[in-house]
Image: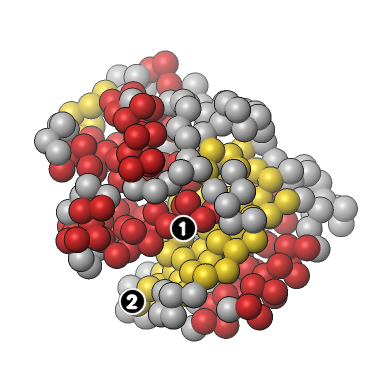
Amino acid sequence: MKDLGAKLNTLCDAQPYSVSWYLKDIRSGKTADRAGSAVVASRSTRKVSIMMALLKAVNDGKFSLTQRVTIPEKYQNTASGVTPFLLPGLELPLRDALILMIVVSDNPCTALIVDMLGTAYLNEYCNTIGMKETIHRFSLPLPTTDLNVNTVISARNQGRLLEMILKGSADKTESAILGCTVEQCRFAIQVMKWQRCDLKIASLLPVPWPPDPEKGAMVASKGGIGPGMFSETGIVFKEGRPLFILCIYNWGVPAVLPDGKPGAAGAAQLMGRLARTAWDALG
């Protein structure tokens, strides 16, 4: 793991921007990180903890995934997701809003769920499960790099959350830590496997088409973007078995890199290379 961490850091050291990452080898239990506890803007990776907090609230009987909800028109002035481009007043089951929040990173659906739960509930939930560096601050994200007004997180926090969901998908004692059932944790992983918006970790992995959970690679992921910020976090599976957890946050990414490449493309390629390096070493 020490050698693998050094390889990942060499890739990051070559970048003209900041990178933090957290890696856990599922089989050995060993971890490595680069500024893993550094507080960074979560952007849309916050939606994983929002999803789990909602599932806990459902488990507690506060909501039902089958109840109908309406997407507020006030939240449709955003470019993230699909509901901003649909007619106002869209009504759908809460389960579908949750799925859209993750698989296409739909911001209006996210804002609706945050309003239903409240940021105080979200922050208490994160604190209770040990996500000490995570603070939820808004329904819709602001286009700023200011950490005082962003929802913040750390790569280690997000990695720990993904590990808890993974463990909870097989053990009711572990799922209870999240306030959820084993079935809810399995559902959360399945939803993240349906990801259609953030495919950077998977970009250089041998993912078959059509996807086959028993062959090659599969990733349950959630990423996020913001001004000069690009991230992705996920559980990487090999032939149906979890191989490793990888959470990557890039910030201070310039619009154009010194070699002329767009910053967004460079950050995406870095994340793909980090994941592939880990795959080759651990797989």
Query: Based on the displayed image, in which of its 4 quarters is residue 83 positioned?
Result: top left
Q: Is residue 43 left or right of residue 258?
A: left
Residue under circle 1? 159
Q: Secondary structure at mark 2?
A: loop
Query: How packed is label 1: few (under 14 Cα within 10 Å), some, or many (20 or more)?
Result: many
Q: Quadrant of the N terminus?
A: bottom right
Can residue 211 be spotted in the picture? yes
Residue 141 position, x and y percent, is 52, 29
Residue 53 against residue 118 in the figure, above or below: below
Q: Give residue 67's position: percent from left, percent from top.
A: 15, 32
Residue 130 in picture, x, y percent from top left:
39, 48
Q: Which residue is mark 2?
A: 240
User: Which residue corresponds to the image point at 36% horizontal and 27% vertical from the top-left?
Assistant: 120
User: What element does badge 1 sit on?
Assistant: helix
Q: Is residue 280 left or right of residue 89?
A: right
Residue 84 visible, this orientation: no
Which three-letter amino acid code belongs to the residue tagged 1? Answer: Gly
Left or right, 9 with respect to 168, comes to right
The residue closer to the viewer here, 18 or 64, is 18
Q: Amino acid at mark 2?
A: Gly
